[in-house]
Image: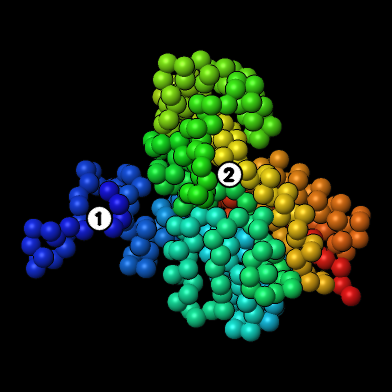
Amino acid sequence: MNVSDQFDNSDNPQKPKRRHRYSGTHPKSYHQKYKEQNLAAYPDIEAHLRAKGKTPAGTHVPVLTDQIIVRLDPKPREIIVDCTVGYGGHASEFLKRIGPTGKLIAMDVDSDELARTHQRLSKDNANISFHHGNFAGIAKVLKKENLDGCDIIFADLGVSSMQIDNPDRGMSYKHEGSLDMRMDSRLKQTAADLLNTFSEEKLSKAFLELADEPDHEKIARQIVSLRAAKPITQVLQLVDIIFAVKGLTAKIWRKQNAVAKFGLLHPAARTFQALRILVNDELGSLRQLLRLAPYCLRQGGRIGIISFHSGEDRIVKQAFRDGVRSGIYQSAAEEPVTPQIEEFVSNPRSASAKFRWAIAKSA
């Protein structure tokens, strides 16, 4: 059921609209959680779920917000490019600091989420413009805005909670759905396309290099073997393959995870991460952003990037260090900022976040 279909009064338009019912006392599927996806009408829901360490469906909790504001230090009259505006959590905080004299340029590859965030943030009559596109095209966006540069570049890498939670996107191993994984619907190849066409060697290499999957060879071999009889197109098909390779079942996994003190990494997590990165060419786009960023920043400008896995963090760390050595940046973070225990407890999805920043040379 789509959110837009949650009310139905087709039999008699004069009767009050009635919500479709679901079995049980609590909604189970993403599309049944209509209250979580309309927090303006149900404001108590967010606080209730956050207290339990959960993120309301269709929303995203920004990570490391206070630390980011301190390091990037947005000020009135400054121009900020939020390369991954997503739900708009970090963007909202930037807008508070730059005020009406500043400008926020919001970019995102996800057109659906960009439209929703446009609607939310535009209500405050803030000086903000929206651009649907990959942050590898930041220079073109600045040119379109008739700007010679900006004061802050910010990017929150990886996948958002809205994308993870929506089974239609196929990004999560927790929900059945088609293996799509495209952040930008204009991309031609889905995760299913790659799974059913890539060679065993290419799949194995991706699982190892993009996610450090220890069973990369076995998983790739099993995928190639099984797809010969039936294409792998659904989330749970792939999850079952990974469970089998690791000698597990869903039931055994649930028991193991239930007794773990802080929860275990899901057996399919690394494979799904690698596929998503591959489908969206995330590392290629990141390298392009880092190459262009110094030429898009004004003197004394700042760049900050949140990464969520070691491959991304290594690329950011090396680019900033090289920038300092070559004189492009005057300084860069020696060590990344990571979430404190309080943030991890209230938002478990922040656990692997690492924030690094660099400052361009001043006059």
Q: Residue furthest bottom?
A: 101
Residue under pointer 1: 5
Pick the front one: 280 or 235:
280
In the rendered view, would you say 88 is above or below 97?
A: above
Q: Residue at x 76, y 46 (%)?
A: 315
Q: Is residue 360 left or right of residue 269?
A: right
Q: Secondary structure at mark 2?
A: helix
Residue under pointer 2: 280
Give the colour scheme of this rendering.
rainbow
Please rate how many residues cluster around mark 2, counting C-alpha atoms within 10 Å: few if below 14, some from 14 to 19, many from 20.
many
Q: Nearer the viewer, mark 1 or mark 2?
A: 2
Q: Is residue 15 left or right of residue 344?
A: left
Give the tally of numbered discs.
2
Pick the front one: 362 or 265:
362
In the rendered view, would you say 86 is above or below 224?
A: below
Pick the front one: 343 or 333:
333
Image coordinates for residue 329, horizontal then vertical, percent: 85, 62
Q: Residue at x 62, y 29 (%)?
A: 207
Measured Cα–Cα span from mark 1 to mark 2: 30 Å
Residue type highlighted by circle 1: Asp
